[in-house]
Image (cartoon, rainbow, N blue to C red):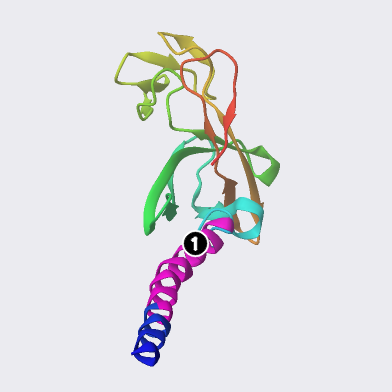
Amino acid sequence: MVDRRKALKVVAGITGAAAVGMAVVPAAAVVAASASPPRLPGRPDDDDGWQAIARWDDLVVGTPRQAHIVGAEVDAWSVSPDRRLGTVWLLRGGEDTASLRALSAVCPHLGCIIERSDAGFVCPCHVSDFSPVGAALRGPSPRSMDPIESRVREGRVEVRWARFRQGTAERIREEG
C-alpha cells in the first residue's frame, strides 16, 4: 500500500511538472520574441530606415510625384507584410540630386491625405492649402507639410519614413 502511494505521488509530481513546463516554455518564447522585433525584407528599418520608392530619372522637374511607403506592419502580436505605411510627395527641383525634396502626404491637421492642386497642394478634408513646396498658406493646418529625409543612391530615390504628431504647431516625430 505504501509503495503504491509513493508511486502515485511520483506520477502526480511528474504530471504536474510537465503541465507547468507546457505553460512556461511558450510564455518564455513569447517574451524572448517580443524583446527583438523581427526584421523583414522590405521593411523601412532595413539599411537604417532607408527605403527605395522611385527612380530619379522618372521624376520630372517641377512636377510633384506621389509615392507610397510599403513594408511590414508590426503590432504587438502579428506581422502583416506588404502594407502601405505612408505616402510622400517627391519634388525634383533640378538636375542635381541635391534638389530632391520629400514631403509627407499626411496633413498635419488631422491626418487626411494631401492631394495635388493647381496652386500646389490641398487637404480635401478641411481645406488646408499648401504652396508648391509644402508651405502652409491657409486653413486649419497648424504647420507646413512635414519634410521626410530623402536621398538618391544609384539612381534610386530613397526616403526614411517618419510620422509626426498631428494637430500641433510644433513638428514632433512619433516613435514606432
Q: Is residue 127 magenta?
A: no
82 lies above or below 126: below
Can you see residue 101? yes
Q: Is residue 34 magenta?
A: yes
Q: Which image quadrant: the N terminus?
A: bottom left
- Image coordinates of residue 87 in percent, x first then y, are 43, 40
Residue that carries the numbered disc 1 in the rendered image: 42
* Residue in view at x 51 percent, y 47 percent: 59
* Residue in view at x 33 percent, y 13 percent: 127
- Image coordinates of residue 133 in percent, x first then y, are 54, 25
Which amino acid type is shown beneath numbered disc 1? Answer: Gly
* Residue in view at x 41 percent, y 9 percent: 140
Check disc 1 and report its element: helix, strand or loop: loop
Q: Main secondary structure of the magenta part?
A: helix
Q: Residue furthest left?
A: 125
123 lies above or below 87: above
Compared across the picture, whether 18 is left or right of 91 comes to left
Res 96 → quadrant: top right
Report the number of numbered marks.
1
Can you see residue 66? no
Specify start and end residues of the magenta stretch as a single range: 13-35
